[in-house]
Image (tube, helix red, strand yellow):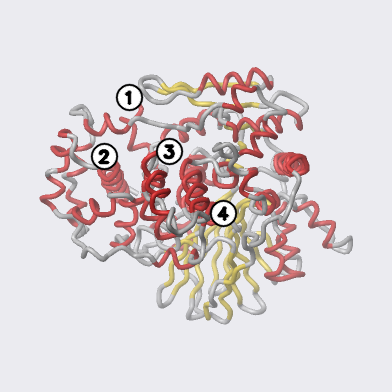
Amino acid sequence: MCGIAGILNLKNNPCPPQGLAALQEALIHRGPDDSGAFSDGPIALAFRRLSILDLERGHQPMSSPDGRWTLVFNGEIYNHLELRKELGPEIKFNTHSDTETLLQGFIRHGTDFFSRLNGMFACALWDQKEKTLTLARDPLGIKPLYFYQSEEFFYFSSELKSLLKAGIPARIHCESLLDYLAYGYVHAPATIIEGIQKFPAGHWLQIKNFQISKPQSFWSLPEESFSKIDPIQAETELKVLLTKAVSDQMQSDVPLGVFLSGGIDSSVVTALMARASSKPVCSYSIGFDGDSVDESAYAETVAKFLKTKHQTIRLPATLLNQIPKMVECLDEPIADAAILPTWHLSTEARKEVKVVLTGEGGDEVFAGYGRHKAAYVSEALEKFPSWMRPMANLIARKTGSGAYFRAIPLDGPRSWAQAEAGGRLQTALHLLNLPQNSQNWAWMDSFQGLKGLNGLLRFDLQTSMRDQLLMKVDKTTMKASLEARVPLLDLRLIDYAFRLPTPLKIKFFRGKYLLRKVASRMLPREIVARKKHGFILRTQNWMRSPQNPFLEEALNNPLLIETGLFKREALKSGARLLREGSADVDVYFRILLFSLWLKSLKNF
């Protein structure tokens, strides 16, 4: 796990060294162990290393023996040993790092090699002979990659703030701000900064002879489901895939552990780690004082059952007063209060280990959210006779809970997005100096035609999972110089899970049916049967409290008005409306974070 950055002069002039140094300096927390740089006429590449594999010889940038190819790479390739065997004995490797595997594979197979990688990665390769720069990002977007193009330069980096260090103007993108206030994050390919884009997951791009090509896809989710599969066979096959995914992601030359919440996803990962390890697994969980949801007792139950070396990090009831720490972790605003406890957890875990496995992805892959049940019901109601459907939809809306049930019938991406935003879109438009039709739906273009439960799972995996949850994990762990791995997002596992029929995902109106069956063979019954929770901080009361130390200052921050995007009078009335209980807490929490984030840019 590392940080990468680079600059290509599109006019074929020498690249200025000071720009690269600025990019690299902003990535120190991602790689405190080592650094490296490469310069060759119009190209300059920078690297910061968090040493995980082959500690002595994995230095980057890494060049081929003949000097033609040079690579910078952030991430892990879990099947790199298998790929070495496929590349053949004629290749003499000088290290046992996955970096060299990627370099040699690309030299021999070009961009076709990306589709053979199972891992998390963002990389850049320079071909000195052909004057070609190739960029690629893993299929699920686990590792971040941002880029910016001016008339003269093409910049890229693992972090958006790194690009700002290079002098790219920090102009707020108005449609992205609206997107953020409505959803709590900015959908790819946009970012909160005008002109800076997220590199598309599962794609590669080449700049050859200083001409930028269109990004090309090298991976996609399976389109076909299993026509028929025996549930017992499916349970066996899923367990094999889970075991392989966890085992592969335990590759490390440094100490590793696991984030254990006590939920089914992280508990399954911990159980499989315990089976694969010759010594007790180091596990870490969060406990909350005050009125936040505290899952630590469940985590401790699992830890005791699996005999892990467990540590519970208890956080105070006043945790939300540390919100500025949360902003420090973020490249762009993400309104997820769980970032704060995740950062604390990462900081404490880093004192003992350098790598952690987490349970992210279980809900998106195996249908664990309430909205997935709503999609399941809505899909079932479509099979009713047309004369029955209106009444059946009405009953479903009245008996189900949550925004997605209230939005039935759910007929595709637009309805899912509207259910997720709810009234926050209109609230945001009331606060912003934007026309009523300012919502940009371009991010949804690639999802047209999706429907039903499987469609929503695809949508989740490639929106909120990629742009919010995975970025939360990356930014918080890397702020602590800790590598996080997500075995439930193993590509072989995802390919299998997305082919499973609906009854093996939701059964008896319970999500993650097949995963629970596997879990029941290795975990206590109370853990398998319990309802889903998560890192839940009670922001409602905190936002409305007169003791909130940030709200008034944040809403009166002159930087908000200087953007030209907020209505001054609407902001002024915000604190009063919150305390009267008539304002949308989520939107104002997002404004508070955005205001603190703007302030942090001034000090960056």
- Could you tell me residue 504's position as x and y percent? 65, 44
Q: Residue at x 68, y 19 (%)?
A: 307
- Could you tell me residue 76's position as x and y percent? 66, 50
Horizontal side of 9 relative to 513 (left or right) equals left
| Mark earlier in primary sequence (3, 1) | 1
Q: Tell me the tag on residue 339.
A: 3
| Mark earlier in primary sequence (4, 2) | 4
Q: Residue furthest right?
A: 89
Instruction: Report, in whole angstroms, how far the alpha carbon at label 4 lies from the one at label 2.
Output: 31 Å
Instruction: Report, in whole angstroms, how far the alpha carbon at label 3 lies from the one at label 1.
Output: 15 Å
Q: Which residue is mark 4?
A: 454
Q: Which residue is mark 1?
A: 318
Please say whether residue 529 is visible from this viewpoint: yes
Query: For the residue carrying disc 2, how many other residues have a C-alpha within 10 Å: few (<14), some (14-19), or many (20+)?
Result: many
Q: Tell me the tag on residue 28.
A: none
Please say whether residue 51 is visible from this viewpoint: no
Say what secondary structure mark 3 lies in.
helix
Instruction: Report, in whole angstroms, how far the alpha carbon at label 2 lies from the one at label 3.
Output: 18 Å
Instruction: Report, in whole angstroms, how far the alpha carbon at label 1 lies from the one at label 4.
Output: 40 Å
Instruction: Report, in whole angstroms, how far the alpha carbon at label 3 lies from the one at label 4.
Output: 28 Å
